[in-house]
Image: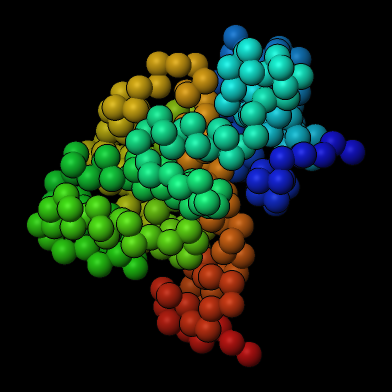
Amino acid sequence: MPIIHDPDLADVLMSASADDMGLLIDVITDSGKGRISLSSSVCRHLMAAKDKGSDESAGAIVAEELTRFGGNSLVNLFRGGSGVPYRELLADVAGHVGAKNKASASCAEMEMAIITKVFAQSLARMSEEDRGTLFESLGGLAYRPGMGPGALAALLASLGSSGLTSYNVAAVVASATMSSLVGRGVVLAGSSTLGRGLAVLAGPGGWAITGIWTAFDLASPAYRVTVPCVIQIGHMRQKMLLKSTCPGCHAVVAAGANFCGKCGIHLGA
């Protein structure tokens, strides 16, 4: 049975939905067109697995190929072709996009720092009305009209490494990213309000996410894979950490929460 050896990828990939894995496969394979550093046999295997709904074998290959993209060919040669550890890939992506990164940070913290950096880059491109709509859809972030860059930075820095608001931010950023790159977004779990935020980020009158990619210089073939994949995996990890849904409104709620953050229903016994 195929095994994902990297402990920082194993749980999140093995618990992923077919839709989420399909998005990763599309990024890695360039929607089936293939990439120079990706063998045609691997590309065919991944696309076939995507069509069937993905499986453990596909998860292992996604992990392997992603970590290969994370290292240069010389490093991979000395590693026996196995790529770099996911934490090392995360640190590289964080440095590339200018996200804060502490050596002691967890993978969830590093992923959210990267996602928050992408999110923050978009705010300067938005009208005040769009900002208000976006923050209202996210919930949990006390946005005030007219907040300057410093206040916005402090607000975003208040995001934790998990929780409903962190999930919401990761979900809309990942969905806008995937929509831009592969033509479809993530499935937004249980919240119609997130759709309004996504419309600001990815809609024709909202955030031009392709301009953000220009700012992050994705000219390197490796970064065209690793940056969006890290964003998607960050969203998948946040969803994994939020396993419960509200029986009343079906919004995603934090495991162990007593009340739904959306409708207020009591979740306890």
* Residue 209 % position (x, y): 32, 33
Colour scheme shown: rainbow
Classify residue 205 as left or right of residue 39. left
Query: In the displayed image of the protein, which residue is found farthest to the bottom?
Result: 269
- 148 to 2, vertically: above or below: below
**Displayed quadrant of residue 77:** top right
Q: Residue 107 appears at what percent x and percent y? A: 55, 48
Front position in the image: 152 or 39: 152
- Residue at 52%, 37% in the rendered image: 90
The outermost residue toward the right is 1
Q: Residue at x 32, y 53 (%)?
A: 197
- Residue 78 at least partly seen: yes
Q: Is residue 152 above or below residue 6?
A: below
Residue 115 appearing in the image: no
Question: In the rendered view, would you say 205 is above or below 222?
Answer: below
* Left or right placement of residue 185 versus residue 2 in this view: left
Residue 94: image location, x then y, percent: 44, 37
Q: Tell me the residue at 71%/29% (across/down).
A: 64
